[in-house]
Image: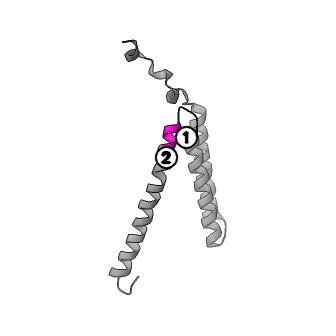
């Protein structure tokens, strides 16, 4: 019976929550977005360089938020969250990639002039 009344605040995932990490994730996301806006609007870079900068900034912001907000690491408390992410990411990219391929194929087949 004592197991039914355990303290939920002592759970490792709840104990890892921190205001400092949430603020750091927010600041990182805002900084990456501001830099991406400056690169897009403020500089006269070639298209490839602009796309590279935005991609790198998106990856940095995404990885930072995965670690700072979701605490995804290889610790014993969070290992299953990390495993679920590792299994979900390829499915996400397959879904997005196949959707792009499908719309490209439909555009090629249905639009006047062949897209």
Give the extent of the magenta segment: 70-83
Mark 2 residue crowding within 10 angstroms, few (<14) / some (14–19) / many (20+)? few
Q: CA distance from mark 2 to mark 1?
A: 9 Å
**Residue 28 at x, y percent in the picture:** 61, 46
Above or below residue 60? Residue 45 is below
**CB atoms of marks 2 and 1 within 8 Å:** yes
Of the numbered discs in the image, which one, if any, rests on residue 30? none
Q: Quadrant of the C terminus?
A: bottom left
Is residue 72 one of those drawn in magenta? Answer: yes
Is residue 73 one of those drawn in magenta? Answer: yes
Task: Report helix, strand or loop for mark 2.
Answer: helix
Considering depth in this image, is 90 or 68 the residue closer to the camera? 90
Looking at the image, can residue 63 be seen? Answer: yes
Main secondary-structure element of the magenta-colored stretch: loop
Which is more N-terminal, label 1 or label 2? 1
What residue do we see at 61% from left, 51% from top? 60
Above or below residue 18? Residue 73 is below
What residue do we see at 53% from left, 37% from top? 79
Of the numbered discs in the image, which one, if any, rests on residue 85? 2
Looking at the image, can residue 41 be seen? Answer: no
Of the numbered discs in the image, which one, if any, rests on residue 72? 1
**Residue 77 at x, y percent in the picture:** 53, 31
**Residue 92 at x, y percent in the picture:** 44, 56
Q: Residue furthest left?
A: 110
Q: Quadrant of the N terminus?
A: top left
């Amino acid at each position: 019976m004592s197991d039914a009344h355990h303290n939920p605040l002592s759970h490792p995932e709840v104990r890892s929550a921190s205001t400092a990490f949430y603020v750091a994730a927010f600041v990182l996301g805002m900084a990456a977005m501001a830099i991406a806006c400056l690169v897009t609007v403020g500089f006269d870079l070639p298209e490839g360089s602009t796309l590279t900068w935005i991609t790198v900034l998106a990856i940095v912001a995404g990885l930072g938020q995965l670690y700072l907000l979701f605490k995804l690491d290889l610790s014993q408390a969070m290992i299953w969250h990390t495993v679920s992410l590792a299994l979900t990411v390829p499915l996400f990219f397959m879904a997005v990639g196949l959707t792009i391929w499908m719309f490209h194929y439909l555009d090629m087949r249905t639009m006047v002039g062949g897209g």
